[in-house]
Image (spheres, rainbow, N blue to C red):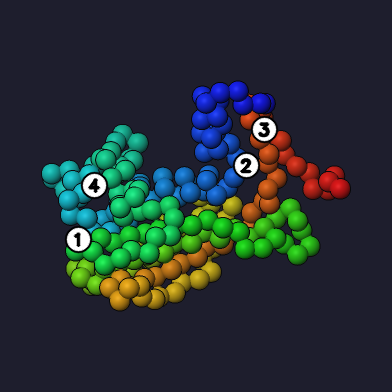
Amino acid sequence: MEIKNKNELLDKLSSYSQNPDDENIRYKELIKNKLLNCPELLYALHEPDLEKELFNKDGTLNVDENGDLAGEVSRFFGTNQNIRPYLFIPETQTDVKNMVCYQVSFDSVGRYNNFQKYTLVTFTIFCQEQDIVDELTGIPRHDLIACILRDKFNWSNIFGMQSKLISSKESIADNHYLVRTIVFEMIDLNGTVTTSYGGKPDYTNYHLRR
């Protein structure tokens, strides 16, 4: 379908977040929704000004009739916020802010099976030295956040296939942040879906391709 005007161009770009072609965009949206409905993670990120989005005045979780968080939890997400859908190396700042960045990539295609690939979901956790130990648990905050992510994603089917933890490493950044990077791997379908603008998804059969 040929694009004829600005509205059609914008409509096509918007469709990338909805069609199944690009798992990078689609998986990042699934991760975002999972993280923003995880009160353990949002609390562990330690943003006192945003606790009112998590709890009611009586200390109960602020949830709707479906059990989902009802506060403005989107305030934890985006540029200059705690949760970011890309890797960002923070510089030293006066305000303490702990962050979780995430990336989606694929490492390799199966040696004898072009129909599948190994997709990696990487979380990089940055915790500032002034706020490194969680007072409630006594656990280093970057380790606590990594534990929460492992609990939510390891052996889960959030992406439609099972993901497993394959790497967990600690490091430092800028001498002021402790970092833990954890990686989940899953065996994924390799580019089997193509959606033309204005059309329906077409599933490629690798056995018929030349």
Residue situated furthest left in the rendering:
57
Residue pointed to by mark 2: 21
Element marked by disc 1: loop
Give the SS element for disc 3.
Answer: loop
Residue drawn at x 21%, y 49% as measured from the top left: 50
| 207 vs 171: above or below | above
Using a 10 Å C-alpha cutoff, classify the residue at mark 3 as few (fewer than 14 neighbours), some (14 to 19) or many (20 or more). few
Q: CA distance from mark 1 to mark 3?
A: 46 Å
- Measuring from the top left, give residue 148's x and y in whole percent: 37, 61
Q: Which circle, 1 or 4, is nearer the viewer?
A: 1
Residue on which the image places disc 4:
54
Of callouts 1 and 2, the N-terminal one: 2
* Amino acid at the residue labelled 1: Asp
At x 68%, y 48%, the residue is 191
In this view, which residue lies farthest toward the front?
5
Mark 1 vs 4: CB contact within 8 A: no
In this picture, residue 34 sits left or right of residue 105: left
Select label 4 or label 3 by which is in front. 3
Which amino acid type is marked by label 4? Leu
**Position of 177 relative to 22 (above/below):** below
Which residue is denoted by mark 3 in the rendering? 196
Rendered image quadrant of residue 180: bottom left
Report the Cα–Cα distance between label 3 and label 2: 10 Å
Q: Amino acid at mark 3?
A: Ser
Quick check: 95 above or below 77? below
